[in-house]
Image (cartoon, rainbow, N blue to C red):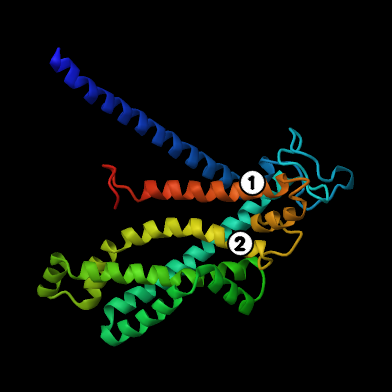
Amino acid sequence: MSRITEEAPVAAVRTRGVRGSSRLNALDAVAIAFLAFLAVAIVAPGLLSPYDPLEAVPGQTLLAPSLEHLFGTDYLGRDLFTRVVHGTGRTIFASFVAVLLGLGAGSLLGLVSASFGRAVDTAISRIVDVLLSIPGLLLSMVVVVALGFGTLNAAIAVGIASVATFARLMRSEVLRVRSLTFVESARHIGAGPLTVLVRHVLPNSYGPVLSMTALQFGSSILWIAALSFLGYGAPPPQPEWGLLVAEGREYIASNPSLTLFPGLVIILTVLAVSRVSGLVAKTPDGAER
């Protein structure tokens, strides 16, 4: 009897563990399904909505959400769901450009900093420290004002603001890998600096950087939306997520759905990207890389 009593809590713990695992798997599936929906919105937005995102219908202004207009209509009678769907490609593309720019330039700076001597390392590290001391959104605003308004310039601005993050991470990973035993062994058997760097250091340094890339993509979506909300992105009437939120704020008391639904899509996208990036960052045994 005592044996049965002792084993009961263990069984309960195991049951809770299995249930927790299935719940996590369900959340992962929802995140992946939502990102797949966004992919369809980017590739073929017409499959999700038959309306024109730019066509105004004066007789259907500020309609409440319904089966015909899932998110309702805006102050010009345009279908809000259609505008959100068509704005997906613009916002995601800008975020993708920003991440690629930050990853490329930041990784190169980090690699040069860790590989070309103390003087170069000190100079680049000081520049990185200065960039990291400035809030990312503020730095993005400064850059986009200098470049000019527009979606592409906003993407470049966000990418420049993220360079320092990638540079610091890449530098630390290169320094860590260079101190490992197998790299020292490669040097001792006569491998040149370039060979060591390309064959041994870089392949073993990119893992954490790629994980950071997935996380930074979610941050870039928020920054791009924020810049668009402030008027630094695409000009009206082009649909962009942040711009849609900004257009609806004047009607937030009478028709909150104009702001609620675009904002909710932004939040869900960032959460889904964060969830999937967590899957990418995990090893097959469930441990973090």
- Give the amino acid type for the residue marked by disc 2 in the picture: Ala
In the rendered image, which residue does mark 1 sit on? 44
Quarter holding the N terminus? top left
Q: Residue 226 shows which numbered tag?
A: 2
Q: Nearer the viewer, residue 26 or 4?
A: 4
Q: Residues within 10 Å of mark 1 (few under 14, many from 20)?
A: some
- For the residues bearing labels 2 and 1, Cβ distance under 8 angstroms: no
Secondary element at image label 2 = helix
Closer to us: mark 2 or mark 1? Answer: 2
Q: Residue at x 43, y 39 (%)?
A: 28
User: Percent position (x, y) of residue 7?
Assistant: 19, 21
Dividing the picture into quarters, in which one does residue 228 lie?
Answer: bottom right
Q: Nearer the viewer, residue 23 or 170?
A: 23
Query: What separation in Å lies between label 2 and label 1 (alpha carbons)?
Result: 25 Å
Secondary element at image label 1 = loop
User: Percent position (x, y) of residue 80?
Assistant: 73, 46
User: Percent position (x, y) of residue 136?
Assistant: 50, 69
Left or right, 31 with reference to 247: left
Q: Residue at x 38, y 46 (%)?
A: 279
Label whose residue precedes the other's in the sequence (2 or 1)? 1
Location of residue 56 with respect to 100 vertically, above or below: above
Q: Residue at x 40, y 68 (%)?
A: 166
Q: Residue 266 shows which numbered tag?
A: none
Dividing the picture into quarters, in which one does residue 285 lie?
Answer: top left
Left or right, 9 with reference to 232: left
- Give the amino acid type for the residue marked by disc 1 in the picture: Ala
Dividing the picture into quarters, in which one does residue 226 lie?
Answer: bottom right
Residue 276 visible in this rendered orientation of the protein: yes
